[in-house]
Image (cartoon, rainbow, N blue to C red):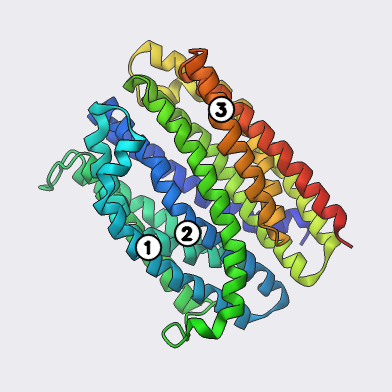
Amino acid sequence: MNKYQELLKITIPAVLESMVTVIISTIDTQMISVLGSNAISAISFTTQPRLIFLSIFFALGTTVSMFVAQAYGRKDKNEANSCFILVLKISLILSVVLGILLYVFADEIMLLCNRQKSTLELSVIYFKIIMGAMIFQTTLTILNAALRGIGNTRVTLISNIALGLIDIVFNYLLIEGHFGFPALGVAGDAIATVMGTIAACMVSLYVLVSHSDFLSLKGFFNTRFKEYRALLSDIYQKAGNTVIENVMMRVGFLVSSVIVSLMNPTDTALYSVGMIVLNYSFAFGDGMQSGVLALTGRSMGEKNYRDLREYIRVAMITGIVCAILLTVIYLLSARWFFGLYFDDEYSKGAGVVIAGIVAGITLFQMTRMVNVGAIRGMGDSRIPKRIAIISTLFISPAVAYLLAVLLDFQIWGIWAAAFVTQSVWSLLAFVSRKKLTNQLE
């Protein structure tokens, strides 16, 4: 099996998994659009605060993938499972505590993040339900991260398909009310998302318990934290860097989101739909990142640096080809896509311009994620943290405020800032990854 085949074997299911998530979000937004622009805007303003808190668990998941991938390369089941079980326990405890706190203080949190009085109450309703039941999403994150570490992306794909199907069914039943179910609007959308996440969690858990030869939950109730002090310290160091990276990144995005909330609901709804388009690029990049992390991590465990470099080269070529194909699709389908959400000509025309900007961002985003995946696969979590902080906490908000507010370019200033941020981020990731690979023997 050549390097392209190895990469695609892991990457294609990972890309499809991420694509399923974005498709669900697309359908979800389209189904909620029957309630109007206020509903779309209200939900969009919960995204960044949700992701700030979930970033802790995304970081733990990334750490599990790193540990498991390298242990898998060394064929060390004990190390892989010790890390997996320990992180899963930490995740369960944190998600219960945070879930309660976020439900109680939802009003205060959303008041900071949403400056539109007409959408604030809806944002609070959605945020309370999603974050109050966050334990299912965080558990799913850790389970799927461990499975990705051994290259098993097919199961994570299946679990996300289950999530999507259940989510869509309950959206239909609960948003407008069908077959005797109550019409709950935004609350119905949130409940549907939780139900889908529970279904996905059950799928991943079943496969891991019943069909995994390498990963196991045996000893889950017997393991004590004090027996793994050295491992806990290593997890803390790597996850800590990734947590800081993710939180700072999301804080930067949150600042941009707050700037967006200063604009009218139509423009914020357009921005929300435009971000869905950009998320398709992210889905491909995220899948590529999962594949690169697993393969470079395995190569590091085996100390096979020639293969490591080849995997990176192959991933870069594949990522660039994907970016070009996505660009063509965006440019050809923009008017049709935005027409799914908006009836007026202004919104459709603005959507075409937004899609053009997203097309320009795509190449930078794709190559950035491949390089970051390679850096993490090589075991370094500090570099991604630094470049993420520079790009998203400083460059993005500063450029967004300058262009959108001071120079009064409004929503177009936000999109220009996104383009600048991704291009700088991509360049920093490339230079950092190149430096690391040159240091390998």
Query: Which residue type carries mark 3?
Result: Ala
**Disc 1 and disc 2 in contact, CB within 8 angstroms:** yes
**Disc 3 and disc 2 in contact, CB within 8 angstroms:** no
What percent of the width, then of the height, locates residue 265? 32, 22
The residue shown at (39%, 20%) is: 267
* Dot placed on the residue nearer the N-terminal end, 3 or 2: 2
Tell me if mark 3 has few (under 14), some (14-19) or many (20+) residues whose alpha carbon lies within 10 angstroms of its own. Answer: some
- Residue 285's place in the image compared with 240, above or below, is above
- Residue 371's place in the image compared with 269, above or below, is below
Query: Which residue type carries mark 2?
Result: Phe
- Say which element carries label 3: helix
Residue beneath disc 1: 95
- Say which element carries label 1: helix
- Pick the residue in front: 322 or 142: 142
- Pick the residue in front: 401 or 314: 401
Q: How far apart are the two marked residues, 3 and 1, measured between alpha carbons?
A: 32 Å
Q: Residue 283's quadrant in the figure?
A: top right
What percent of the width, then of the height, locates residue 427? 73, 37
Does residue 332 show up?
A: no
What percent of the width, then of the height, locates residue 234? 62, 71
Q: How far apart are the two marked residues, 1 and 2, measured between alpha carbons?
A: 9 Å
* Dot placed on the residue nearer the N-terminal end, 3 or 1: 1
Residue beneath disc 2: 57
The residue shown at (78%, 71%) is: 302
Q: Nearer the viewer, mark 3 or mark 1?
A: 3
Q: Nearer the viewer, mark 3 or mark 2?
A: 3
- Residue 3 appears left or right of 17: right
- Pick the residue in front: 30 or 430: 430
Tell me if mark 2 has few (under 14), some (14-19) or many (20+) residues whose alpha carbon lies within 10 angstroms of its own. Answer: many
Quarter placement of the C terminus: bottom right
Which numbered marker is on residue 398? 3
The residue shown at (76%, 62%) is: 1
